Image (cartoon, grey):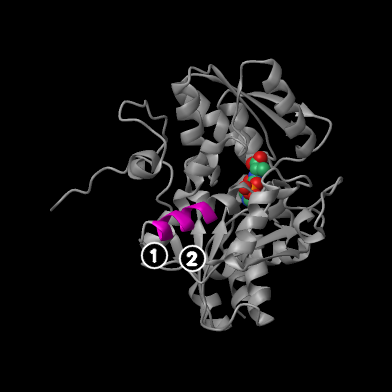
Amino acid sequence: MSFKQRYIGIINRYRDHLPVHDDTRIISLGEGNTPLVRLSHISRERGVDIYVKYEGLNPTCSFKDRGMTLAVTKAVEEGSMAIICASTGNTSASAAAYAARAGIQAFVLIPEGKIALGKLAQAMMHGAQVIQIKGNFDDGMRLVRQAAEHLSVTIVNSINPYRLQGQKTAAFEIVEELGRAPDYHCIPVGNAGNITAHWMGYSEYQQIGVVATRPVMVGYQATGANPFIRGEMVDKPDTVATAIRIGHPQSWKQAWMAREESGGWFDECSDEEILAAQKLLASREGVFCEPASAISLAGAMRDVSRGKIPQGAKIVCTLTGHGLKDPDVAIQQSRKPLTAVEPRLEEIKALILRAVA
Ligand code: F0G
């Protein structure tokens, strides 16, 4: 029996493509190396070859960890004792965990009452200073920028260039696993860092000759938080997919560039479409993602049915976060209410027989 080398995270794996030195102290939780799951039922039914990149299986259960390992590694290398971010939840969870790992303080600004419970639990458990603001993510982002001008704290939102450098490794993994770039890459868009990072990753692999082609990039937003579809900022964004409840995306120009250069497009999905795709994925394919993530599949399926994405295409959808992040929304949308029965075999038998009848 031969032993595989221990996997210890994206910085170690992609060191040659990332801005680190030989003696950089790496702050890692073993992020990356996430599964690319082929959706067998949905592919067969729709006549396409569709995969999901399950980023919910990162250490804090979202794609943010790929960027956070590098952002926190560099913050520590540069002597920073504190990091700060605004967040719809996942960035705060990731920042909190990597700060704990590094032994520095994290300050996280979250919109009051608008982040999923799992994410709040993570930030609190990892010892971040959680600051709830009576405003939305965009207000938080403005305050974080202002605070960093006055205080010695490192911003770890995706305006920190190291975040995108780390997140581009998801594109590397996809290419390596498929042996080529997909034809289409469908991805949720909120602050627009991740679509930008993926395009960087695909472009780098093309430049150095790993692949000949890059995918068409397709970005989806929720109908109530859709600045890229309107072509202008949105002041009061709202959607059940709280992770992407953002009206003033920070990587505005870069995301438009990814769209232009790849020949892609932006489109929107309603909250109903998002929740239906989340349910379909969980119940038909066994993959549980949070609502914001499901928008990539909701949009892809619609674009396939409209013929915008052709039959036979190889499609990758990014599932940005795990379904357990947001248990409330998952339970609320379950059609059958939960009831309790007496602990007797007859009761159980009756229920099972009724269900299979
Ligand atoms: N999906 C999930 C689950 C997210 O948490 C986010 C962003 C996105 C998609 C959108 O990615 O911003 O790079 O376009 N969440 C940030 C946060 C804003 O604070 O956790 P993006």
> Which residue corresponds to mark 1?
211
Percent position of residue 36, x then y:
44, 61
Q: Badge 1: how crowded within 10 Å, few (<14), some, or many (20+)? A: some
Disc sitting over residue 51 in the figure: none
Amino acid type indicated by mark 1: Val
- Is residue 133 visible to us here? yes
Tell me what residue is drawn at x 56 percent, y 31 percent.
95
Name the residue at 86% across, 45% down. 235
* Marks 2,1: beta carbons within 8 A: yes
Given the image, on which type of amino acid does mark 2 rest?
Answer: Arg
Residue 55 rendering spot, x and y as whole percentages: 51, 52
Q: Is residue 110 left or right of residue 286?
A: right
Q: Which mark is residue 214?
A: 2
In the image, 251: left or right of 284? right
Residue 340 appears in the rendering? no
Q: CA distance from mark 2 to mark 1?
A: 8 Å
- Give the overall secondary structure of the magenta segment: helix
Which residues lie in the magenta part?
A: 199-207
Count of all numbered marks drawn on residues in the image: 2
Height in image: 219 above or below 42? Answer: above
Say which element carries label 2: loop
Q: Residues within 10 Å of mark 2 (few under 14, many from 20)?
A: many
Q: Position of residue 168 (x, y in %)?
A: 49, 49
**Residue name at image x 70 percent, y 57 percent:** 338
